[in-house]
Amino acid sequence: MVAAHTEELRGAQQASRTAEQAREVHKEEIRVLREQIAQLNEGLADRDQLRTQVKKLEATQSRVHQLEVELSDREAAHRGVIQQLEQSLAERDQRIDELVPVTHLLREKEADVKEWEKQHARTVQDHEVEVGKLQEQCTAQDQLRAQHQLDEQRLHERGQEIESLQHQLHELHVERERLSKEVQSIPGKDEHIEKLRMQLKEVRAALREKSVPADGAPRQVRHAESQPSAQLGSPKGDKSTQKDAQKDDLKKIHGIGPVFAQTLNKMGMWTFVQIARWKPDDINKIAKKLETDPERIKRENWIADAKKQHFRKYGERL
């Protein structure tokens, strides 16, 4: 609609300019006609002079009469032309007068168009504000979506942790039942343990009485003395010493991946027994070298899992 009004306004302006040009042309034509009339008036003055000369020169009276007739004809023709020009000027003036209201209407239309342009500018500005608000809302939605995904990921991790804890709880229940059965069988093993302790004392005495020095014997004695009493009384002590020298797959421990396993091997950790004997200070030192949190090692129960893996592989409890 604005484009139609603008086109109508342009057409009216073009018509107004055309009318103004036509008016200027008519003014120029009127000026030329007035000059011609002035020339004709001068010609009339010349005619009077000629009449005077005709009176003086009667011999040329017929010629003068002809000239008067011609001048009369020209005067009549010029008057007809002047009347036509005046009529044309009147008609053009009437047309100009008719175009004046159109000019006022065009000016009113221009005012309306300007007002519409202002309204359009305000509408565009309002739309830009709304677009900005929508963009902010989209940004907020993206942030909420990212937060939701992060929450889902955390829930998934928590679910995995809960599943791992449930698995560990199940294993603890199994271990508890097994320990209960072992506790029930402990009274019958006390006598066997005492016999083994007596045998161990005899072995120590025999080793001390040997006159030939052996490089491995003192170390074995010191190693045996450093073990807890329960391990010293075990008949599988020699086998445990051999198993310590073997290499276990540390990746079987929950929480130890290939990278951690490789780093532990570089540190000299090759067996489940070594990890099972860690102390709190050892955990802090090893966690620092592994570049992880000591609480993670405690939370994932590496020590308990190492004992469990050792029992599964060797059938021996630590």
Image: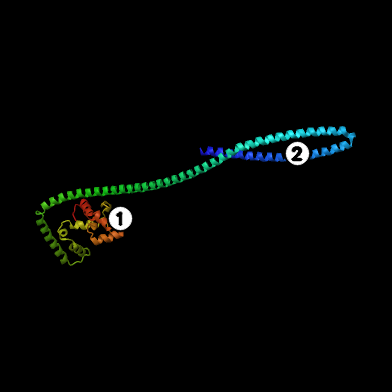
Q: Check disc 2 and give the amino acid type.
A: Ile
> Which residue is located at x 69 percent, y 36 percent?
86
Image x and y of residue 24, in percent? 67, 41
Taking 276 as reference, is 26 above or below it? above
Q: In this view, does 284 lie to the left or right of 30?
A: left
Q: Name the residue at 85% across, 34% down.
A: 64
- For marks 1 and 2 on the same chain, the one whose residue lies earlier in the sequence: 2
Could one spot residue 271 in this view of the protein? no
Can you say whether 187 is above or below 74 in the image? below
Mark 1: few, some, or many residues within 10 Å (few <14, many ≥20)? some
Seen from the viewer's position, the closer of residues 42 and 257 is: 42
User: Regarding mark 1 in the picture, which secondary structure is present there?
Assistant: helix
**Extreme-bottom residue of the structure:** 211
Q: In this view, does 166 lie above or below 230?
A: above
Q: Quadrant of residue 40?
A: top right
Q: Nearer the viewer, residue 207 or 232?
A: 232
> Where does label 1 land, which residue?
260
Numbered circle sitting on residue 251: none
Whole-Å distance between the Cαs marked 1 and 2?
121 Å
Residue 48: name its quadrant: top right
Q: Is mark 2 on a helix, strand or loop?
A: helix
Check contact, mark 1 vs mark 2: CB within 8 A.
Answer: no
Give the amino acid type for the residue marked by disc 1 in the picture: Phe
Name which residue lies at 69% across and 40% down.
27
Residue at the (40%, 47%) spot, across then down: 133
The x and y percentages for residue 298 are 24, 56
Q: Label 2: which residue?
A: 37
